Image: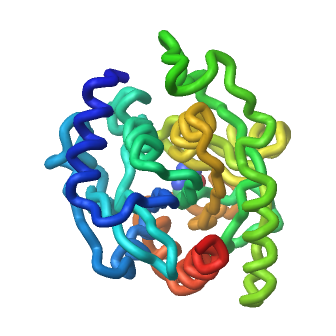
Amino acid sequence: MKLKQLQEATTFIAEKLQERPKIGLILGSGLGMLADEIEQPVKIKYQEIPGFPISTVEGHAGQLVCGKLNGSAVIAMQGRFHYYEGYGLDAVTFPVRVMKALGVEKLIVTNAAGGVNHAFKPGDLMLITDHLNNTGQNPLIGPNDPEQGVRFPDMSTAYDRKLQQLARDVAQSIQLDLKEGVYVWNTGPTYETPAEIRMLQAIGGDAVGMSTVPEVIVARHVGIEVLGISCISNMAAGILDQPLNHEEVIETTEKVRGAFLDFVKAILAKLA
Ligand code: HPA
């Protein structure tokens, strides 16, 4: 990560904003429309921002949307960068460092994930209580800049306990049956084999996906508190006797869009 790029991107964005965002939102596949509800939005296409990679995958719009959402000053990534697209993890996590430089204190990360836990069903929302990095990759490999964070960051509360409790309380207040569990990061782009899913069950995974963990690692490195929510878009490979595809993932996330929106907005109202 180049400090100059970080400064350039931060200045470029800050100049366009009336108010510094306090809460970052990273919106996963099929969940990007939350950003469409931001009031008086300032939209900045990724390709305009110095140092930003450009999003390529279908279902991802590729822009920052900044403004107010339910009383909170937010900066939302409508579309994120995935390791499987060929970006280095520096690029994947660059926007999180920019968020920190802009003043973000809390990050809400969302994703579409396969249900590994048999008790889940497609359409469920899962509070991420912890993660398993199943890739052997880490965005912090390389020289450490002590201005950004410590060499060996603690991951024992990667997902902030107070934010988890707030999410539980909000879910209860809107009668949302919020599931909870451990999110496993695999690189993708292949979905898993049934044997791999049995392994993930054995090692304590509840949901599996191809994102989120690198961003969370970097958020913790720079001292941002994290709340993670997965939309269970499908049951993982081998659980139901049917093939997996991206269309199903998008279809399910679109179906629960309403519930997801209400949930995140109610959380933001509590944080305002
Ligand atoms: N596996 C990995 N990533 C995913 C899945 C899955 O089943 N569903 C959505 N993202």
User: Which percent across, then down, holds residue 120?
Assistant: 76, 68
What is the quadrant of residue 62 in the picture? bottom left
**Which residue is more in the foreground, 209 or 196?**
209
At a point 72% along the width and 62% down the height, the residue shown is 127
Is 89 drawn above or below residue 55 in the view shown?
above
At a point 79% along the width and 59% down the height, the residue shown is 162
User: Which percent across, then down, holds residue 271?
Assistant: 63, 71
Color theme of the render: rainbow
User: Which percent across, then down, holds residue 96?
Assistant: 45, 43
Looking at the image, residue 178 sits to the left or right of residue 217; the answer is right
What is the quadrant of residue 239 in the picture? bottom right
Is 183 drawn above or below residue 120 in the view shown?
above
What is the quadrant of residue 156 in the picture? top right
**Which residue is more in the foreground, 187 or 31?**
31
Is 129 drawn above or below residue 220 in the view shown?
below
Evaluate whether residue 251 shows in this view: yes
**Which residue is more in the foreground, 103 or 85?**
103
Looking at the image, residue 25 sits to the left or right of residue 240; the answer is left
At a point 51% along the width and 45% down the height, the residue shown is 211
**Which residue is more in the foreground, 240 or 265?**
265
User: Which percent across, then down, holds residue 164?
Assistant: 77, 61
Evaluate whether residue 189 shows in this view: no
Number of numbered discs present? 0
Looking at this rendering, what residue extends furthest in the left direction? 48
Is 78 drawn above or below residue 259 in the view shown?
above
Looking at the image, residue 42 sits to the left or right of residue 134; the answer is left
At a point 72% along the width and 89% down the height, the residue shown is 174
Question: Which quadrant is home to the C terminus?
Answer: bottom right
Question: Which quadrant is home to the N terminus?
Answer: top left
